[in-house]
Image (spheres, grey):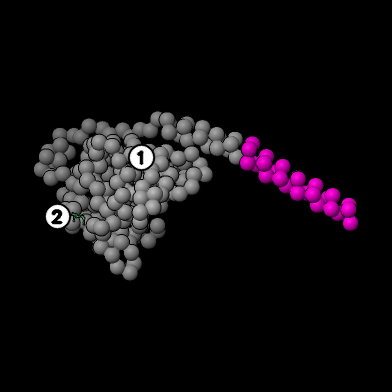
Amino acid sequence: MPRTHISKSHTRIYYLLLYLYNLLILRPIHYLLLLHKRHILQFQPVTYHCPPPSKLCLSQLRKLPIKTLVLDLDETLIHSQHNCIIPYDFSINVKIDGIPTQFYVYKRPHLDFFLKMVSEWYYVVLFTASLETYANAIATQIDPTQKYIKKRYFRHNCSVDFTGYTKDLKIIQKDLSRIFIIDNSPTAYKGNPDNAIPIKSWYADNNDQCLLELLPILDALRFTKDVRSVLKRNIHLHSLW
Ligand SMILES: *[C@@H]1O[C@H](CO)[C@@H](O)[C@H](O)[C@H]1NC(C)=O
C-alpha cells in the first residue's frame, strides 16, 4: 500500500515537471522560433515587376473610367482570434455588445505590398460582413490614413438571407462593368458571380502567396472594358473554396 502511494506521487511530480518544462522552456522557444520565422518572411524581398504600360495600353486606360476593387476583410486580408498562440501583427480592443473584447490580428502575407500595388490601379474599398466597430479598428491599423482603402462598408450594408450575408456591389457602383470583389466566401458574391475573384480562406499559413499571385490578373483587368467578360470565365472555380 505505501509503495503504490509513493509511486503515485512520483508520477504526479513527474507530470508536473513535464508540464512546467513544456510551459517554461519549450513554449517560449517555440514562440521565439515562430517570431523569427515571421520576421524573415516579412522582409523577404517581394517583387512584382509591373512594366510601364505601352502607348496602346495608356490610350485604352484613358478611355476607361477608373474601376472599383472591393476587398473582403476576414480570412481574405487578415485573420483575427481572441487568444494569441503565435505572434500577432497587432491587437485591437473593441466593444462588442457593450463588452470590451480583445482581438489579435494577423495580416495575410504580402498584404501591405498588395494594397500598395492595387491602389495604384483601382479605387479600392473594403466591404465586410463584420461589425463596423471591429472592422473599422482593423482597417485603421492596416491603412491609418486611408491612403489605399478609400471607403469602408460593413455588415449593415450587406443584404441578409438564410444563407448568410450577401454583398450587393450595386450599392457601391451601379455600373457593374467596372467593379469586382475579392472574397473567400462565395455567399458574399452570389448576387454578382460575374464580378468576383474567389480566394482561398486564410487563417495562419505564413507561406501563403495568394495575394501576390493575384497581382498579374489584377494588373491586366484594369485594361478591360467590362470586367465581367473575363471574370465570368472564373465561375468553375467558385465551388473550389
Ligand atoms: C451603409 O450603411 C450605412 C448605415 O446603415 C448607411 O448610412 C450608408 O448609406 C450605407 N452605404 C451605402 C452605400 O448603402
Residue holding disc 1: 111
Q: Residue at x 45, y 34 (%)?
A: 41
Q: Residues within 10 Å of mark 1 (few under 14, many from 20)?
A: some
The residue closer to the viewer here, 201 or 45, is: 201
Residue with the most extreme bottom position: 162
Q: Residue at x 33, y 39 (%)?
A: 141
Looking at the rendered structure, the secondary structure element under dot 1 is helix
**Mark-to-mark CA distance, 1 and 2:** 28 Å
Q: Residue at x 38, y 45 (%)?
A: 93
The residue closer to the viewer here, 130 or 186, is: 130
Task: Find ligand 1 in the image and state its quadrant.
Answer: bottom left
Where in the figure is residue 49, as x and y percent of width and height? 31, 33
Where in the figure is residue 224, as x and y percent of width and height? 19, 47
User: Mark 1 near ligand 1 (CB under 8 Å)?
Assistant: no
Does the magenta segment cover residue 24?
A: yes
Q: Which residues are magenta?
A: 1-25
Left or right: 175 as drawn, with respect to 18: left
Q: Residue at x 48, y 39 (%)?
A: 87
The quadrant in which residue 31 appears is: top right
Residue holding disc 2: 175
